[in-house]
Image (cartoon, helix red, strand yellow):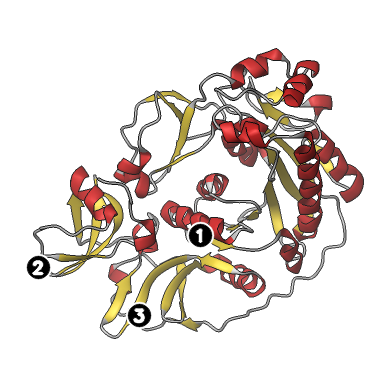
Amino acid sequence: MSIPFPSAFEERVKKDLFLGQDLLTALDAQAPVSLRFHPLKKRSDLEVIAEIPWCENGVYLKERPSFTLDPLFHAGAYYPQEAGSMVLDSLLKELDLPASPKILDLCAAPGGKSTLIASFLGGDGLLVSNEVIQARSRILKENMSKWGYSNSIVTNNDPKDFQRLPQFFDLIIVDAPCSGEGMFRKDEKAREEWSEDNVHLCCGRQKRILADVWDALIPGGYLIYSTCTFNTNENEENVEWMVEELGAEVIQMELPSPIATGRNGIGHYCLPGRTETEGFFVAVVQKGDEKLQRQRFTRKAEFRMQKDLLDIPVYADLSETIVLNWNDKLLALPKTMEEHMLHVQAQMRLQKMGTTIGEVSRKGIIPNEELALNPQLCIYPERIDLNRQQALNYLHGDTFPLSGTQGYRLVTFEQEPLGWMKHLGNRFNNLYPKEWRIRMNV
């Protein structure tokens, strides 16, 4: 790094016996490259050097490839994610959650933790992934669509809006906006933007977010609080504030070594130099017992049950879903979660709900990209497997000579679905979403 550490940060770290010079040395070293494979999709042949001990399907790579030029990246076969934040996988497996839990990922964009939670749920329960900034919520929607589970909703709301869902969630994850000290290892801009004033500003914002969403947690439910920073103000002190102001109870969790227990026994740290991470703090608290409110479920929009499914059964396995027609878009929702999902839809500003399997047109049903990328639903037999260059051209939005018969075809690479085309016999219409297309030369 050519930009030095902010002097106030460097002095603070050196005086902190919990951190010390070793952290500064590690933050000037090269950051590791890590990702997490999708449990139901094909594994890419990227060069793996080690598994991440606290996350199933998490691995370290020898070097950072060009993910954009790997068709399996676009297929949602893996998600590049910082290794420290993958500790969420161990926490989820240790928590005493009910069957089919309802989980809120409050600050979810771009989608690393939400895709991890989706894999943990495996299509069971409900995941609501929220992002307050609209542009980032669209990125979140894309990543959740590519990961491909139907028991998910993507919302674009302020944390206080979730007060409309009192005592609804069994678990809330708050990966709070922070001063970003864990970004110093790879981002020079993060070093330039850091200041003591910004640390205190972040502390206030974090408390507001936690207070705003607390009512949405069911009595006895859990909240996982995390940041990518090292200072006690944004970490341990905020957890203590939750105990004092919200009546939370800190839950002690067992995490694999060398993840360090936080100051005063509060939370855990993935510290550069001790772990192969960029830096991450996480703590778990539990809401105390209080009177459980009676849930009143509401609907905002009118949906029609899609009884005449035309040729949809040859596209998708709908045995465990219901199909709703919303403005001629066919949404597949898990039967067990229909009431809960429509209740969330009634209260929140939605970007995505369930899996869009197709759109009703005058000539039939046009299959949707979300269906192609959902490994639990898509069973369409008419497939065309492309080689790497053809796949990249397809993802670029190109058309090219390709033999085949007329009709909708599922486009695959190494048998992993990428999207749809409409084959016309001697040419095809490329149906890959324009907003997802590769923009660099392929």
Q: Measuring from the top left, give residue 382's x and y in whole percent.
A: 20, 62
Which x, y percent locates residue 242?
Answer: 85, 45
- In this rendering, the count of numbered labels is 3
**CB within 8 Å, label 3 to label 2:** no
- The amino acid type found where label 1 is placed reads Arg
**Label of residue 162 in the image:** none
Q: How much space separates mark 3 and mark 2, taking CA atoms? A: 23 Å
Q: Dots 2 and 1: beta carbons under 8 Å? A: no
Q: Secondary structure at mark 3?
A: strand
Task: Give coordinates of residue 45: x percent, y percent.
Answer: 31, 33
Residue at 57 percent of width and 68 percent of height: 350
Q: Determine whether label 1 and label 3 are within 8 Å by CB.
A: no
2 or 1: tag closer to the N-terminus: 1
Q: Quadrant of residue 28?
A: top right
* Quarter of the rendering occupied by the N terminus: top right
Which secondary structure lies at badge 2? loop
The amino acid beneath tag 3 is Val
Residue 421 can be seen, yes or no: yes
Tell me how far mark 1 sits from mark 3, CA to CA. 23 Å
User: Quick check: 343 above or below 18?
Assistant: below
Q: Is residue 218 visible?
A: no
- 156 vs 236: above or below: below
Return the residue found at the far right.
244
Residue at (70% x, 41% y) in the render: 178
23 vs 10, nearest the viewer: 10
The residue beneath circle 2 is: 425
Q: Amino acid at mark 2?
A: Gly
Q: What residue sits right under mark 1 in the picture? A: 138
- Give the residue pinned by disc 3: 360
In primary-sequence order, the first of circles 3 and 2 is 3
* Picture residue at 35% right of the left edge, 36% below the top: 66
